[in-house]
Amino acid sequence: MAILLVDVWLGVLDRYVLHLQLAWVEELARYIMIWGIMLAVPCCTAAREHMGLRLVVDRLPLFPQQLLSIAIGVTSVGFFTLIAVTGIAFAEKGFQQFSTVFALPMFWAYLAIPVTFGLTAFQGLLVLALDVIALFESRHSDVKGAVS
């Protein structure tokens, strides 16, 4: 993010003071923002900070809440895996396209999609595993409490 900040400030300084007409600052900022935003997705998944509608879920008893969380987790991991796999083919098509200023293959920008969604699927699996463990621990403690 520090590189993005320096790059954007350089672009502003160039536009209003230096007048060097540096064409690359805008393109560099664009690719840094793409990667930065996309890499935030797996971080949010790991911390369970994604936006969601909890109105119905929070009104359910604990066991149905846990089952619904697991179902949502399985669906999410499947979706993220699908996007990661199809994103690979999309990124490969980027070898035939080149960026305007840097003349780099767009593969490097498009690669953010499979990398991000692959990492998100992995983080989703870890969160799903924690949800399954929590379900079994709560069910085990309910059975243990009923016996004693």
Image (cartoon, helix red, strand yellow):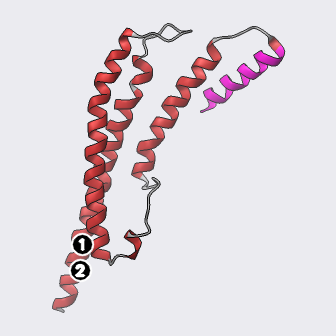
Residue 76 x/y as whole percent: 31, 49
Hey, which quadrant is residue 140 in on the image?
A: bottom left
Q: Nearer the viewer, residue 46 or 55?
A: 55
Residue 52 x/y as whole percent: 44, 58
The region drawn magenta spans: 1-17
The residues tagged by marks 2 and 1 sit, at their Cα atoms, a distance apart of: 6 Å
Q: Residue furthest left?
A: 147
Q: Which mark is residue 137?
A: 1
Q: Is residue 147 left or right of residue 90?
A: left
Magenta stretch holds residue 33: no
The amino acid type, in three-letter code, at marker 2 is Ser
Residue 136 x/y as whole percent: 21, 70
Q: Nearer the viewer, residue 62 or 75?
A: 75
Q: Secondary structure at mark 2?
A: helix
Q: Nearer the viewer, residue 11 or 87?
A: 87
The amino acid type, in three-letter code, at marker 1 is Glu
Q: Within 10 Å of the Cα at label 1, are there few (<14), some (14-19), or many (20+) other Cα atoms?
A: few
Which residue is drawn at the image coordinates 43% and 16% (left, top)?
Answer: 106
Which residue is drawn at the image coordinates 54% and 9% (left, top)?
Answer: 100
Which residue is drawn at the image coordinates 30% and 25% (left, top)?
Answer: 88
Residue position for label 2: 141
Q: Within 10 Å of the Cα at label 2, are there few (<14), some (14-19), or many (20+) other Cα atoms?
A: few
Q: Is residue 116 above or below residue 145?
A: above
Q: Is residue 22 above or below residue 75?
A: above
Residue 112 x/y as whole percent: 41, 28
Tell me whether circle 2 and circle 1 mark residues in contact (CB < 8 Å): yes
Q: Quadrant of the N terminus?
A: top right
Q: Quadrant of the C terminus?
A: bottom left
